[in-house]
Amino acid sequence: MKYQRPKGTADILPEEAVAWSYIENVAKKLFANYRFNEIRTPMFENFEVFSRSAGDTSDIVTKEMYDFHDKGDRHITLRPEGTAGVVRAFVENKLYGPEQIKPVKLYYMGPMFRYERPQSGRLREFHQIGVEAFGSESPNLDVEVISMGMHLLKKLGIQNFKLVINSLGDKETRKAYREALIAYLEPHFDELSDDSKERLHRNPLRVLDSKDKNDQKLVANAPSILDYLSDDSKQHFETVKQLLGDLNIPYEVESSMVRGLDYYNHTIFEIMAHDKVLGDGDVTVCAGGRYNGLVEELGGPETPGIGFGLGVERLLLLMQAQNAALPKTNDLDVYVVAIGDETKAETLKIVEKVREYGFSADQDYLNRKPKSQFKTANRLNAKIVMTIGNDELAKQVVNLKVMATGDEQQVKLEDVYKNFPKLFGKFLEK
């Protein structure tokens, strides 16, 4: 029987994993500059964590979640997104306590799972990098989170992207807009898709997010939520726009944008890229928004929050298409060529000592001839090749060659063991 990976998953091979690690490391360094700290949550949660947070009319809950009952008859879900699990951890571990410096800034990285049609940059097991900040309603924090997402894409070499924003307002806004949207859509009820018919009275904003082309035509002239913003919501959104302008961050306002999860309110945003590798038109690369009320929904105290998430697979496709700088291999500092069985123990000692000093080192493990070992050193792009044979072993020396220049010199083994970092730097400077 031939075994294959499940549909909608991918093997990340060693040469690809180097690029993944690069993206993660760039993100970690940037997040640290903004004082965000890493959090790691389980890959599966109780079903209610996501059904209560994402909303029971969202596509994620109704169509895409991998959920099952375990051997203890507990209803379990593989996480379809990162925010709800982080909020659950925030509440359960009382990170809202008075000893915590507000806002509490967190980031996460890891696999997510959604049962949907696999396509370019969109798999059933996908990887997400995201941030969450709890404890402040300030528009400054909205803009900081948006700016951080923009900076991350710039640092990774992404070009041709734009910021699109909207406001979903507060409870007062949503109530007034809900009534107006239902009033607008009810005369067209028979023309709506089956999903939208079901959602119309339960959560009419979901109709705005419909992928059905006829639904999209119907909502094109729907009332704008921006016309129903309460005074507080309007002031918050105006301040966000002003601050974006102060930072010279261009943006577009899209009043029909609602995002795919029910917990959002006030500021929402999408950073969209235009590149044919992701399909026609503008495609969302990074997205998020404010979710005041979600902490209370999952059992915590009243605590505002805001965050974003981005898919690594889609990001990597975009970077490759735009020729962004991506490392392809791990650099090798030293390769040791052993000539003769008697030198194998000394070769092992050399590579281990080099590694102890913090450098990468490798050797032959297949009893190959010196010519084959040198070919391997070339293929691995070794910076330095050390060669030791029986004569060198007797004299307690090693032949050292700088591969970039071809310079060769014999050095004492004692110097390798006692002062390799200085030796390494000295030869590469020549």
Image (cartoon, rainbow, N blue to C red):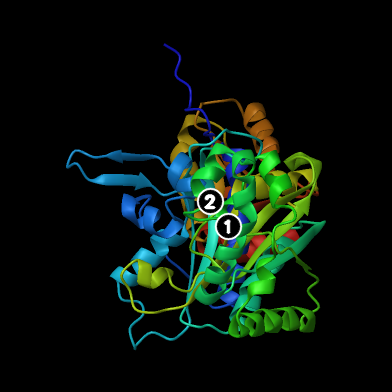
Depicted 45 relative to depicted 393: above or below: below
Name the amino acid, label 2.
Answer: Leu
- Label 1 crowding class (10 Å Cα cut-off): few <14, some 14-19, many 20+? some
Depicted 390 relative to depicted 25: above or below: above
Q: Is residue 47 left or right of residue 65?
A: left
Count of marks, rendered view:
2
- Label 2 crowding class (10 Å Cα cut-off): few <14, some 14-19, many 20+? many
Q: Quadrant of residue 385?
A: top right
Q: Residue 171: x percent and y percent? A: 50, 74
| Pointer 1 residue | 182
For marks 1 and 2, give the CA distance. Answer: 7 Å
User: Which residue extends farthest top?
Assistant: 1
At numbered mark 2, what does the secondary structure look like: helix, strand or loop? Answer: loop
**Picture quarter with the C terminus:** bottom right
Name the amino acid, label 1.
Answer: Ile
Foreground: 252 or 10? 252
Give the residue at x 42% y 51%: 56
Depicted 220 relative to depicted 168: above or below: above
Q: Is residue 120 left or right of residue 158?
A: left
Q: Examine the rendering and report whether any part of residue 184 can be seen.
A: yes
Q: Residue 80: x percent and y percent? A: 46, 48
The disc placed on residue 380 is: none
Give the residue at x 69% y 40%: 214
Q: Examine the rendering and report whether any part of residue 395 can be seen.
A: no
Q: Quadrant of residue 170?
A: bottom right
Give the residue at x 42% y 65%: 39
Foreground: 335 or 160? 160
| Pointer 2 residue | 200
Circle 1/circle 2 CB separation < 8 Å: yes
**Picture quarter with the N terminus:** top left
